[in-house]
Amino acid sequence: MEVKDASSALLSNYEVFQLLTDLKEQRKESGKNKHSSGQQNLNTITYETLKYISKTPCRHQSPEIVREFLTAMKSHKLTKAEKLQLLNHRPVTAVEIQLMVEESEERLTEEQIEALLHTVMSILPAGPEDEQKKNASSDMAVDEEDPA
Amino acid sequence: MFVLVEMVDTVRIPPWQFERKLNDSIAEELNKKLANKVVYNVGLCICLFDITKLEDAYVFPGDGASHTKVHFRYVVFHPFLDEILIGKIKGCSPEGVHVSLGFFDDILIPPESLQQPAKFDEAEQVWVWEYETEEGAHDLYMDTGEEIRFRVVDESFVDTSPTGPSSAEATSSSEELPKKEAPYTLVGSISEPGLGLLSWWTSN
């Protein structure tokens, strides 16, 4: 076996989530050989990875949301890796932005960080735990939006 | 967190599977070979993304199966350096804090990369961050099961392919079993503001 390109493309968590969900559906339909010993590894890894990604904000994303997010990010001049981290984690505080964006104190002013946070929170849908927290506390000023 | 890796391999399809569509058989064989396995210097393979090219299938004398050279792309877990990840604390030991992502377990945060000052509580076997404020020191415990945000600072691949017969003879008489080494480990760090248990930084 030969590895031609060990890093030909970066995948967002949402893309992997989509792929694994489709794979699960396909295998459910052609049910017979799901439990053969050879498929056990695939079952384990897809189950665990799906479980992990389902707890992140990525599960509510869609291709349109991702496209909209990337278009909005163009003006902020971030690297691919930084945009990917913002897409996967959906930061809600300035501290998180500073972690994900390298040298953010030099590259972004406070207003730019606020604007970035606002873009992230308005375009990307919140994760499942965040939904519960939003309903529970009345102090958060984030707009609740429903990606149609 | 995940990357697409282009690979080439020859897939053997036994004759009793010839009635199935070639693409399905090949996809199944590739997943059987690679899913949930670590490829040296590449990462933890998750599942097949797509098949980009199928070359001609050959049948060799003496073996009734068909051999097809396949070019394909595989989804691999391979976080880049300095990436931020969120995992669950699996446990603490004097070596550091062990973190797990569910599908990947071998992540260690060594004591020097914890929020300083930190100490190891021997009684409860847990690492503690001694957070100082004007009022005094708060002890923040890193309990098992808590979600933790960390930065990937290093990775190491170990080649766990079996060694030849000569070295096995020398070791088998003295030791019972060779130590099992994880083929792929990540080293994390939480020594920056914003890193560590999620509950330390939420502003509720």
Image (cartoon, coloured by chain):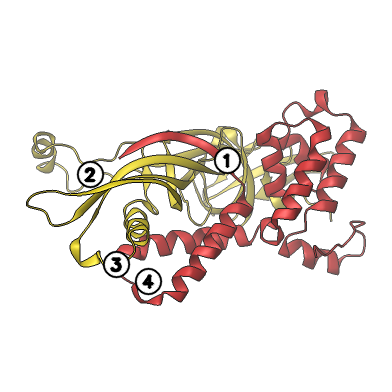
Identity, as a three-letter code, of the amino acid under mark 1: Leu
**Which color is chain B depicted in?**
yellow
Task: Name the mark nearer the viewer: 1 or 3.
Answer: 1
- Local packing at callout 2 (Cα closer than 10 Å; few below 14, some 14-19, many 20+) is few
Q: Are marks 2 and 4 on the same chain?
A: no
Relative vertical location of residue B15 with respect to residue B161 in this rendering, above or below: below
Cα distance in 3D space between marks 1 and 4: 29 Å
What chain does mark 2 sit on?
B
Residue annotated with mark 3: A37
Q: Is residue A112 left or right of residue B197?
A: right
Question: Which image quarter: residue A6?
Answer: top left
The relative height of residue B151 versus residue B57 in the rendered view (above or below) is above
Quick check: do tags 3 and 4 share a chain? yes
Secondary structure of the residue carrying numbered label 1: strand
Identify residue for label 2: B178
Residue at mark 1: A10
| Kind of residue indicated by mark 2 | Pro
Residue in the picture at 46% in, 40% down: B5
Determine the CA span between mark 1 and mark 3.
31 Å
Residue ID at (17%, 48%): B176
In this picture, residue A113 sits left or right of residue A41? right
Q: Cα distance, mark 2 to mark 4?
A: 34 Å
Q: Residue at x 31, y 53 (%)?
A: B33
Classify mark 3: helix, strand or loop: helix
* Residue B106 drawn above or below residue B31: above
Which of labels 2 and 3 is toward the front? 3
Place of residue A30 in the rendered image (x, y in percent of width and height, measured from the top left): 41, 74
Q: Residue furthest top?
A: A106
Quadrant assignment, res B117: top right
